[in-house]
Amino acid sequence: MNSNDYLGDPIEHIDIKTHDLTSLIEAMSKMSFQARNLANAASIYQQMLADSSCCIMLTLAGSLFSAGLKQVVIDMINFNMVDVIISTGANIVDQDFFEAIGFRHYKGNPYLDDEELRAVQIDRIYDTLIREEELRICDKAIQEIADSLGSGTYSSRQFIAAMGEWLTTRSNRVESVVETAYKKNVPIFVPAFSDCSAGFGLVAHQHKRPDSHVAIDSVKDFRELTRLKINCRRTGLLMIGGGAPKNFAQDTVVAAELIGEETEMHRYSIQITVADERDGALSGSTLKEAHSWGKVNKASEQMVYCEATIAMPLLVNSAYHSKSWQERLAKQLATTF
């Protein structure tokens, strides 16, 4: 078998605009367990959208865009349902930017022979497949962008904005989160930027130019995001998964205090996760626990223990069709830097 035998059925991105499921979410509010938790989370998200003073921070962890959730986030940006994004690098570079330059993710299954996949240079993400050769082209594109910039230190936000600008010059590009956010002035932060294809591209860039190159400064990231939190004052967190993006966003409250600035805890907070709190790890730590650290207000918080490809479309669908966003103005936070 060759690679084409495996890559015949591409992942399609779900469109929350085509189906109105608000009545389903309302019915779930009368149920128990995670159905009721999800309905409560939908209510809190709509409160965020209705609060004109609230800046909404969306955090993304896990393999989301490869799984078909890219259009959900594009719609959130286009309809002013999010003001800043904090993500893992894989979502932004290996998945979104990867598709923006013309490549696809494909349906597979978790029981394929991984030795055979390796032999034909196909990488597997559980039940999803990608062509290794195309990832290398993505790496090269990152190197090309880095080569085009002046040497010096950049925040991930600055570099991702350069990626968005680069995409606007390509006639064969596909709609993406990176370009949409760039055009709508929604900043994107990736606190662990080298932990993805961007890292390979930047390694190649610095190897080629050891004495004059681009470097990503994660402290600059944290400083910029903390400044956004201070300026916005009232904030809401919508966290998909956990990991570094979750902590990065939550910690801005503590960072502001350390530099002598007063800012309130994140007023609203939602986390969708399948992680368990009992091992003490970050991804499963509850929002009530975060309150003990002074990070989130416990008055409007909701944990939803559900896999993101199920819960996120339902949550955003409910908010979109409730029209809570229609009076909301774009905050264009990228223009504040």
Image: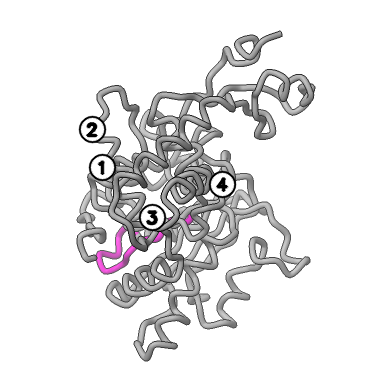
Q: Quadrant of the N terminus?
A: top right
Give the Cα distance between marks 1 and 3: 20 Å
Instruction: Please give the label number shown on residue 165.
Output: 1
Q: Nearer the viewer, mark 1 or mark 3?
A: 3
Give the Cα distance between marks 4 and 2: 45 Å
Magenta region: 49-59
Q: Which residue in the structure is indicated by mark 3?
A: 213
Q: Nearer the viewer, mark 3 or mark 2?
A: 3
Q: Amino acid at mark 3?
A: His
Q: Which residue in the structure is indicated by mark 4?
A: 28
Mark 2 element type = loop
Say which label, 4 or 1, has the lower sequence index.
4
Q: Is residue 148 left or right of residue 26?
A: left
Say which label, 3 or 4, has the lower sequence index.
4
Cβ atoms at labels 2 and 1 below 8 Å apart: yes
Instruction: Please give the label number shown on residue 169.
Output: 2
Q: Amino acid at mark 2?
A: Thr
Q: Amino acid at mark 4?
A: Met
Q: Within 10 angstroms of label 3, few (less than 14), some, or many (20 or more) residues?
A: some
